[in-house]
Image (spheres, grey):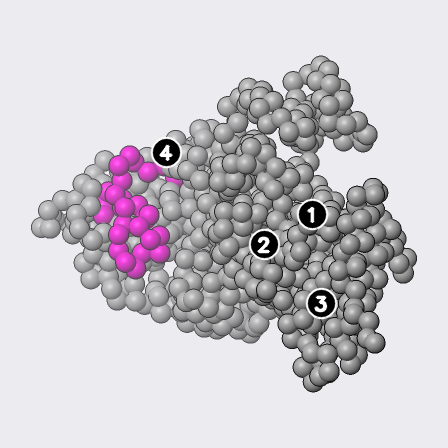
Amino acid sequence: MTDGTRGGGPPGGAALCHRPDCPAAGHGRINDRGFCSECGHKAQGPAPGAASPGAPASASGTPEASGILESESTATAARARRRAVAGKFTVRPAGDGLMDLPRVELPSLRDLIDNDPQPPPKGQPCAGQGCEETVGAAYAGQPALWAGFCPRPDCRHPFDFTPKLRPGDLLGGQYEVVGCVAYGGLGWVYLAEDTQLDRQPVAIKGLINDDDETAQRAAVEERRYLTLLDHQGILRIINYVPHPDRDSGRLRGYIVMEFVAGMTLAGIRDRIKRSEPPFDDSRLYQYILTYGAHILDALEYLHGEKLVYCDIKPSNVMHHEGRVKVIDLGAVRRLGQRDGPVTYTDWFASPEVRERGAADLTELHDLYGVGRTLLNLSDKAVRADQRPPGLGAESYRRLLDRATAFDPRRRFRSAREMAEQLRGVLRELHSLRLEREQPEPSTLFSPTAALLDSGLGRIPGLERWLAGEARPVLADGRPDPAEVPFGLPVPFPDAKDPGAALLNTPTGSGPRRLIEQLGAFPHESAEIRFRICRAHLELGEPADAEAQLRAVERIIGGGAPYDWRLNWHRALVRLTEGAVAEARQEFDAVYDALPGEYAPKLALGYCAEHLRDHGAAEQFYQAVWQRNRSQGSAAFGLARLRLAAGDRTGAVDVLGGVPKVSRHHDAAQIATVRALAGRLGHPDRLPTETDFAEALTRLPRLYLDDGRASGHARERLTAEVLEVALDWVLRYGAADDAREAGALFGERDEQSAVRARLEKALRALAQQADSPEALEVLVDRANAVRPMTRV
């Protein structure tokens, strides 16, 4: 087993490697002999159990722990070999698709043949029962050993890393060995050709040591599981053949597999670190997430077969051509299997399995390994132009934080759940990078017809002219916190909840009647309680809503601290109470749990906007808006931020991007006209002539009054625009030279023209009055703007 792979967990209190060149970044475990499980180097400083520097060598020729020094020449040669092999691959740019990967190609499979195979320079963990000694490692300037005995006096288990097959060997009368390619966790890998099938290339894998019972058992398990597996993302087993040993004549077992000519993600990691194209720009994180998506697809299949992979890490995932394959399934175990040690690599293994082994092995251990694998790749991206834009980096971080949470109950519950959130983050990165939307319906939240807007996209009512304010500024449009819960998406009921079927049945009941009906449900149901909670919020009863959430906590029991639905509904209650800062904290917890979803980002955008944290609000709204242009609430949020900064053009650009297919398109068009023609923040902040010209061009095209050319809505909006137009003419226009100063209507007496139009509009509003008092006010307003008659 290589790269620090172990059977069982580490001893308690093991030291960690702090070498600056260690790929595990301070997490590689130092074994009893002083070597790091990740980088393979001697620890800097004393290691646990180290003997004195002058300790004598053991009988096998291996010195005691403190005398072991890795041979720099051996390590250098190994690194040179890896670079030479990697250099033979051609990496072509990816296509433009969301999950397109660079294409990794190898001109000739024979380029992979190692004509001078060497023993693993870092050695291997001893195969003796319960022994974790490293055997065969290079030391004291000497090369790594091919064969010998474990130096631990109470073990002395033999090891032999010699390749047992040579070029020309014919296995099973069918598979002709071409040469040795590499050593893997449980054995050497050879390239061979199928002489009965057009000399198709195959990979052959044998045991490290014929006498190694642990390796033999693992190989048998590997053969059993792999022959049953059929997934495009998992290495396929073709056959299993025996072959006599050249020296002893004993039959050895070999596994025949499809040959995958590609680079492992460990090789990709090296290219990322060197910022080699195409891993040198911000698309890098899309590639990393795409690797994760493919790995999770394979794991979902394995978990469905009641298997756990156990040892996910970069060196066990292959990128070949434009595809990804999980390889080396020697560590696969049955779910629930409690006997024998678990094979894993320390830095990629979950804390519970490192601590308690097979007793705590579940699918969540694999998800932890995926998170650590992606982190191991992205940590090598040190250049600023490799980082994702906008909120993408934060969403990526939260995705990995949940996958690698110390407490397994805080991790994703399944490979499918993690893949769903991963793909959401992937779409976010893609849309932010290209400013091109990547919409996909959520499986957790239902869309809402409501719009987070309180006036910007609405036609003003008659009260605007009846209030007595002479020169009102444009309404900001930010809704009151108590309105927001009804403009946010609603979580779908959990299908496993006993009340889900009832909640999926349409009802026309009002909130009070709905509370009575759902209260009669005879079973304990968290989803029923959540719905009653939202009904109380509709009625403005946050205390009763909070009581429903306490009932949900009782129903869920120990899982309550890990259920994002509780955080979501607590945030709604806090908004209704006006406690926006507290709501923001609860929505942030939902973002932690669901980093790929729209809903928590939209909610956090509003909270940040309300709390005047406009930088954060911009990032949240942009993440939602760029990914799905039909999300009108995000567009309106961005438009409000632009208008608050005095940027009419920016607001109009965002609102103009709401597509016709969006239910919020018409509101966005109304808001565009109002933004172009309104007073921003102060009565004296008037639009430019260009803004007015655009507003007057758009106004007749608006879909108002059910498509009629005239009606109450069009009359009110026209009156609002003309009132500001009169202000503009009074400030910038002149009766006789208006065309030279700038004319809105192209008439010589611009002021009279605007006054006449505004008078007509206000008299039309007077026809909408529903009381004599309102009629009188509107007629007076019309008379006040009437143009003077010339004699």
State how far apart marks 4 and 3 are (Cα).
77 Å
Mark toward the viewer: 1 or 2: 1
State how far apart marks 4 and 1 are (Cα).
71 Å
Provide the residue span drawn in magenta.
Answer: 7-34
Judged from the image, the secondary structure of the residue bearing numbered disc 1 is loop
Q: Which mark is residue 726?
A: 3
Q: Are marks 4 and 3 in contact (CB under 8 Å)?
A: no
Q: Which mark is residue 355?
A: 4
Which secondary structure class fits the magenta region best? loop
Q: Are marks 1 and 3 in contact (CB under 8 Å)?
A: no
Labels 4 and 2: the sequence-earlier one: 4
Mark toward the viewer: 3 or 2: 3
**Disc 4 crowd, CA 10 A, few/some/many (<14, 14-19, 20+):** some
Residue of label 2: 621
- Disc 2 marks a residue whose amino acid type is Tyr
Question: Is residue 706 at least partly visible in the picture?
Answer: yes
Labels 1 and 3: the sequence-earlier one: 1
Residue 83 placement (x, y as % from top left): 40, 69
State how far apart marks 1 and 2 are (Cα).
34 Å
- Disc 1 marks a residue whose amino acid type is Ala
- Disc 4 marks a residue whose amino acid type is Glu
Q: Which mark is residue 467?
A: 1
**Disc 3 crowd, CA 10 A, few/some/many (<14, 14-19, 20+):** many
Judged from the image, the secondary structure of the residue bearing numbered disc 2 is helix
Residue 298 placement (x, y as % from top left): 59, 47
Q: Nearer the viewer, residue 564 or 673?
A: 673
Residue 193 placement (x, y as % from top left): 58, 63
Residue 658 placement (x, y as % from top left): 71, 59
State how far apart marks 3 and 2 are (Cα).
35 Å
